[in-house]
Amino acid sequence: MKATTFAYRGIGLEAVLDLAHDLYAKRGTALVRHYHLAARMRGGPSGGHAVVLPREQQPVDYHGCVAGRMVVFDAKETKDRVEWSLDRRYSHQVDRLWAWSSFGALAFFAVECVPRHTLFLLRIHGELPPFGFPVTAAWPRCDFELAVGHEVAGMVIVPANPEGWYDWLPAVQLRGWLD
């Protein structure tokens, strides 16, 4: 049986977000960068292999500053047209985002629904739980069918712009998340 690797999940979304963040930096509106530290390479040039960091050492995917406010988030993607569930695999990420939020940072998950070409920003704040978006059992579930066309507390919907990237900063500013 071949081992399953999750090392490159979301690499397409990360490339699109990195483009947006480069544009924000060039415009002087925000500085947001990807950590790129989920795994380290060990070994020589011909025999290297990835070593995954323990969960407690893994940082959030993105960190930055917008108008003097710390911004941190994790990027996820789903190919499901209906929903994305935050399951126990992500509990350490929720804890880490909540910790940043409790010290005043804007913290969220950025979930791309690939078939819809839409980015859903799911804010982590306040008491745990709730997480500021729909909850099923003890863990949140983002229902894309519910979200599209409706106001959902703690969620910002960002469709891909004509150039094909997600300009999430104006949507967050409009929602007042940075106030």
Image: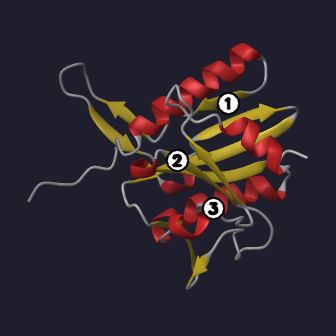
Q: Position of residue 22 (x, y in %)?
A: 62, 20
Q: Position of residue 50 (x, y in %)?
A: 32, 38
Q: Categorize mark 3 by other alpha carbons within 10 Å: few (<14), some (14-19), many (20+).
A: few
Which label sits in the foreground, 1 or 3? 3
User: Which amino acid, by three-letter code, is at mark 1?
Assistant: Val
Query: Residue at coordinates 75% horizontally, 52% vertically from top-left?
Result: 100
Give the mark nearer the N terminus: 2 vs 3.
2
Query: Residue at coordinates 58% horizontally, 61% vertically from top-left?
Result: 148
Contact (Cβ within 8 Å) of mark 2 with mark 3: no
Q: Which residue is mark 1?
A: 32
- Look at the numbered disc 3 and give the secondary structure of its residue: loop
- Look at the numbered disc 2 and give the secondary structure of its residue: strand
Answer whether residue 143 is visible to the viewer in this image: yes
User: Which amino acid, by three-letter code, is at mark 3?
Assistant: Gly
Q: Which mark is residue 118?
A: 2
Give the mark nearer the N terminus: 1 vs 3.
1
Q: Which residue is mark 3?
A: 149
